[in-house]
Amino acid sequence: MKKFFLFFACASLFVMGAKAQDSKSLFNEAQKAYNAYFVKAQTGDLDDEAAANLQNSFNLYTQALACDTTYETNKDGTPKVDKKTGVQKYKTKVSGDIVKAFTNMINNNDFLRVGEYYRGKEDFHNAAIAYALSADLLQSKFAQEAPDNATLSEILFLQGFANFFDKNYKDCFINMVNAKELGYTSNNIDAYISDVPSMIVQDYVNANNYAAADEALDYMIAKVPSVSSLYSLKARVVEFENGFDAAIPAYETALAKDPNSAFTNYCLGYGYYGIVENAINNSNAMSDAAVAKEVAHLLDKPIEYLNKAITLNNNISSDMLEDAQKKLERLQLIKSFVK
């Protein structure tokens, strides 16, 4: 899972954004913005202005922290090194106070509170941003202790929920998976995890945008590589674009990731069944027995995969299960004609 860190480096972006103000001035501005937020938060009068003040204070504290460290040099310009530690000497003005400010934000659940505010007014884009900062701060070095899984998983679920209604489906899926891995099981989270990737892929496939479908899957795999169903969907995209034969290696990769996936077994069984049907349709044999003999060497794979899909029955729809059963019955009937 992504961790959140702030670095003691004065990046040019921060300097430009701060209009060359020093860390002390930035810190004072951050304090002023935070206090304006806090007054309304304490009285239960949160509004857009207060929420914006919290975000602004966070940004200013971050900029101040990044520019607060001044490294010391000797008269000749070489680094002045601490003889005991071997580390270059440096001075700070407000870093300690900024660390306390971030810790205070964590202890007060400020960004969680703002996330709830935005969710309540159905501003899901800003809600997702606030929940993300809440989760990141909880996992940062500014937290006094590691967050408990129950708290963090709920925030990640809320972030994923906001992502969904903000139509940021890729991050919705990633946050839902992370929440589930930390133990979150409420609010139909399994449906989000199972349905969202398929929904993303289907939308792109419907638009014949296979590259975008593949890119989305690669993004999700990079973030949560443990989810084996993503590899099956990658194979599915290859099949939609280039046919089943081209997709076989990708399906085999998916099956290696999770041999007990009913969906992958179903897809392979379905594809190999199509090969049998094509062979039957192209046959010039004059009897059922003769046709069966021609396709006999093609029967074992679809029977194996469809039978396993039916036996597993763990991540396929009732329609897929019924289809697998019908196809398996037909294959077994064809096989019965083979002498």
Image (spheres, rainbow, N blue to C red):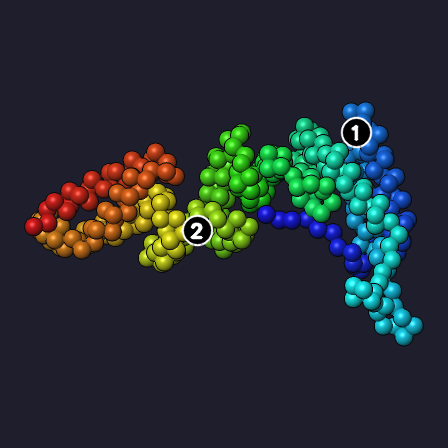
- Counting every numbered tag in the picture gives 2
Residue 27 at x, y percent in the picture: 87, 46
- Identify which residue, 230 or 277, lies in the foreground: 230
Residue 36 at x, y percent in the picture: 85, 34
Please tell me which residue is depicted at 35% across the width and 45% down the height of the picture: 260
Please tell me which residue is depicted at 86% across the width and 68% down the height of the picture: 80
For this view, does 305 lie left or right of residue 115? left
Label 1 or label 2, whichever comes before in sequence order: 1
Q: Disc 2 designates what residue?
A: 231
Q: Secondary structure at mark 1?
A: helix
When the figure is inspected, residue 244 is found, relative to residue 118, above or below; the finding is below
Please tell me which residue is depicted at 17% across the width and 53% down the height of the picture: 295
Q: Residues within 10 Å of mark 1 (few under 14, many from 20)?
A: some
- Identify which residue, 139 or 263, lies in the foreground: 139
Residue 295 seen in the current view: yes
Quadrant position of residue 68? bottom right
Residue 136 seen in the current view: no
When the figure is inspected, residue 45 is found, relative to residue 101, above or below; the finding is above
Circle on res. 41: 1
For this view, does 109 lie left or right of residue 326? right
Residue 169 at x, y percent in the picture: 56, 42
Residue type at mark 1: give it: Ala
Q: Secondary structure at mark 2?
A: helix
- Identify which residue, 213 or 25, lies in the foreground: 25
Q: Residue furthest bottom?
A: 76
Q: Residues within 10 Å of mark 2 (few under 14, many from 20)?
A: many
Cα–Cα span, label 1 and label 2: 45 Å
Q: Residue furthest right?
A: 75
Please tell me which residue is depicted at 69% across the width and 46% down the height of the picture: 140
- Identify which residue, 319 or 44, lies in the foreground: 44
Residue type at mark 2: give it: Tyr
